[in-house]
Image (spheres, rainbow, N blue to C red):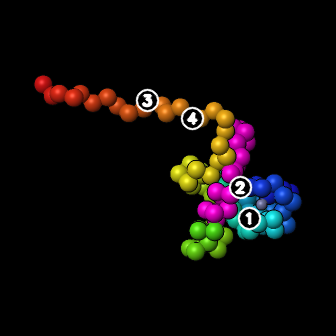
Amino acid sequence: MKCLICHAASNTVHATEDWSEVTCSAGCGRFRVSANLIKKMKSRNEFFDIERTRQWLKMSRNDEPVPLISTYDYNVALLHRDTEQRPVIAPSRSRQPLTSE
Ligand SMILES: [Zn+2]
């Protein structure tokens, strides 16, 4: 099996319904990735930004020896690799009237 972050051959992959655990000797170390996120990345053909994700793991290991990368972390910590097309910010904000009548 391959490391989900850097795609090097990884030593151990332990998969459950909720997450996959990888031990990568190429520099990523031991971590878990949520099954939802793996599915999402596959469907969108996205990849981890190796440097950013390794940094994030390093920080997270202060609290958790085997950090779990969830979809939330992936989005919030911007762990995805920059693509050529920048995401367009959707006008999702609801319009608020400037003046109240
Ligand atoms: Zn790796």
Residue 12 screen position, x and y as percent: 82, 66
The percent position of residue 89, horizontal first and vertical second, equals: 49, 33
Mark 3 vs mark 4: give the one in front.
4
Gap in angstroms between the C-alphas marked 3 and 4: 12 Å
Disc with the residue nearer the chain's start (3 vs 1): 1
Question: Which residue is label 2 attached to?
Answer: 50
The residue indicated by pointer 1 is 28
Q: Is mark 2 within 8 Å of ligand 1?
A: yes
Residue 74's disc number: none
Q: Could you tell me residue 4's position as x and y percent?
A: 76, 55
Circle 4 residue:
87
In this orientation, does residue 70 appear? yes
- Which residue is found at the position 53% from the left and 31% from the top? 88
**Is 64 or 58 nearer to us in this picture?**
58
Q: Residues within 10 Å of mark 4 (few under 14, many from 20)?
A: few
Rounded to the nearest angstrom, the CA distance separating label 2 from label 1 is: 8 Å
Does the magenta-highlighted stretch encompass residue 83? Answer: no
Question: Does residue 7 appear to the left or right of 47 in the view shown?
Answer: right
